[in-house]
Amino acid sequence: MSRLPAALLLAGAVVLGASLLSAGAFAQSENEVYDRIEELHGNAEAFDRPLRQLVRAMRSDDAESIAGLAEYPLTVKANGETYDVENAEDFVENFDDLVTPETRRAVGRQQYQDLFVSSDGVMLANGAVWMGAVCEDNACGDSHWAIIAINN
């Protein structure tokens, strides 16, 4: 087989896979998501609580709780701009501008089995929010899960 047809076949498979994933046709179990988190980041057991807190806080527009789940400085993309939010107080003061109602609704409906896990972290709501395991020190013996980016 020549390289061109093989490359076209591969490109088609990538496009098909991406469209199935974005359409939700790619089914994965909660166990598969958990295992992927553990494989790439470790500390998968500790991910559940902050995820549930974030989903609940987004449903109720609880800016303080969401701010408490973030790692600062936090990069937020909103309104065609990129902001570096320095602390929780700034996040709460500017919450309505930093987290759109669409992002709040999407994260508020997040299901565990629909999470996307990569080496960058765990993606919620098709990339609207990313959470990551943040090291407590340089040795990274301990970590905590936090919001590491918001992309409205």
Image (cartoon, grey):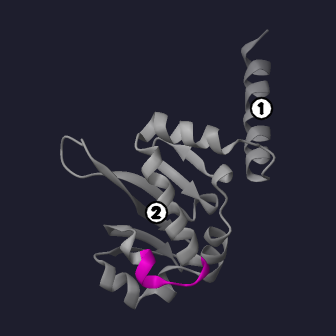
Instruction: Please tell me which of labels 2 and 1 falls first in the chain.
Output: 1
List x then y, in percent, for residue 47: 46, 53
- 80 left or right of 85? right
Count neighbours of disc 1 (C-alpha within 10 A) and say few if under 14, some if 14 to 19, many if 20 or more.
few
Q: Residue at x 51, y 51 (%)?
A: 122
- Give the image quarter of residue 146: bottom left
Which of these two is toward me, 106 or 10?
A: 106
Residue at numbered disc 1:
13
> Amino acid under label 2?
Pro
- Find the distance from the CA under tag 2 to the CA under tag 1: 35 Å
From the image, which quarter does the N terminus lie in?
top right
SS at circle 1:
helix
SS at circle 2:
helix
- 66 left or right of 61? left
In magenta stretch: residue 61: yes
Q: Is residue 73 above or below residue 130?
A: below
The magenta stretch is 59-66
Residue at numbered disc 2:
50
Q: Is residue 150 above or below residue 111?
A: below
> Amino acid under label 1?
Ala
